[in-house]
Amino acid sequence: MEKIKGLRCRECGRASPAAPHHVCEFCFGPLEVDYHYENLQRIVTRARIEAGPPSIWRYKDLLPIDGEVTLGHHVGFTPIIRSRNLAEEWGLKELWVKNDSVCHPTWSFKDRVVSVAVIKAREFGFDTVACASTGNLANSVAAHAAEARLRSYIFIPADLEQGKIVGTLIYNPTLVAVEGNYDEVNRLCSEVADKYRWAFVNISIRPFYSEGSKTYGFEIFEQLGWRAPKHIVIPCAGGSLLAKVWKALKEWKALGLIEDAGTRIHAAQALGCGPIVTAIKHKTDVLVPVRPNTIAKSLAIGNPADGYYAVKAVKESGGWAEHASDEEVLEGMELLARTEGIFTETAGGVTVAATKKLIEQGIIPRDESVVLSITGMGAKTQEALSGRLPETMTIRPSLAAFDQALAEWKTKHYIN
Ligand SMILES: *Cc1c(COP(=O)(O)O)cnc(C)c1O
Ligand SMILES: [Zn+2]
């Protein structure tokens, strides 16, 4: 069965062959992968998906890979958790946590996009992959390049968290720390991509890369029992995840895999870098780039590549958006850990904080189903929590020492 039609310009609609390109030759609009949906209509069924592997590859029919899956066999199919404690705290009837903080192999949703992109890079015959990253992408590209035995060049802002740097270097890539913010790194990478024949996963082969984000949505719908929730709150950096979850929803409705549930998609960003959320709140689709200043470094993109499409998706779905200050981000991380036992990174704190505000404003009604998008792991952004964690009870190794410390602890913390 032929499934990939080619690339299509999102602005002028012109078709072009499936090649390592990302902008339209005619109008410079971004390109998107187009499929032979009439063929997919005939073969894609719930039963066929359920018979697939417990990974993103159960959705391979809807991903832009021609041949076999050659790496990243265990990516995705992360848990969706029915929240009881946080739901109770917020007075919600039905709250779910889609937990990509445990995505294999590098603990963020970026493994979904990168595994697709690196397989595609090999199909196109590249021997080197590269990326401009805010951290998680760096981890994932380095890991998948190692598995694929490809060379990798990873470009990051020099001030990233230690967990993100170590979690990249362990795979032995060439790590280029650029003294500038992500937008400056990205601009540099566009020039590097023009000069060197490397597959920049989020630039030169971005149309293929971003399709991997759809699997986050597919999993939510399948894991909720082939049903879309009423609300999904999604953190945005470049805006690709949000735009592609919307595409996933439209594809599955068109293929008859799920019913229309009137799902509203809400965007979450940090106050110190929230151009997508600002545009939504101002009811405009004109994005004003900002200079990032936030602890949510994985979301710190001041000029988001898919920002316009993220705004459009939120608008089409009838969703809304919220910012989170750095203090609210930290409270969000602590709240999710305290109530659900899930340690997410700063981006997850943004989602939790934004969701809380959307509920308080009545934009998310308390009797409707909600999915919180947790996209990354807390152990990678430990410095954000410095000075905020509870003290440790430190003792000599004797029962008497413990008894005494326990008594003091209970008095101090008012525990019976
Ligand atoms: C990259 C990233 C996002 C947002 O991704 P975009 O598709 O660029 O909007 C969200 N959460 C985490 C943890 C990320 O690393
Ligand atoms: Zn065009």
Image (tube, grey):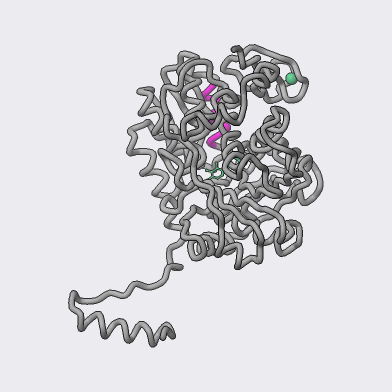
Q: In this view, does 16 lie above or below 407?
A: above
Ligand 2 resides in the quarter of the picture at top right
Residue 203 coordinates in the image, percent (x, y): 57, 27
Q: Given the current orientation, which residue lies at the most extreme left position?
A: 398
Q: In this view, does 391 lie above or below 110?
A: below
Whether residue 148 can be seen here: yes
Residue at coordinates 51% horizontally, 29% vertically from top-left? 51
> Would residue 411 be found to the left or right of residue 285 on screen?
left
Residue 12 coordinates in the image, percent (x, y): 78, 20
- Where's the C terminus, which quadrant? bottom left
The span shown in magenta is: 185-193
Whether residue 157 can be seen here: no
Residue at coordinates 59% horizontally, 29% vertically from top-left? 211
Residue 192 coordinates in the image, percent (x, y): 51, 24
Please state which of residues 379 and 404 is positioned toward the viewer in this rendering.
Answer: 404
Residue 315 part of the magenta-drawn span: no
Residue 190 part of the magenta-drawn span: yes
Our reading of the magenta stretch's main secondary structure is helix
> Would residue 8 be found to the left or right of residue 338 on screen?
right
Residue at coordinates 51% horizontally, 40% vertically from top-left? 109
- Where's the N terminus, which quadrant? top right
Please state which of residues 337 and 160 is positioned toward the viewer in this rendering.
Answer: 337
The quarter holding residue 61 reads top right
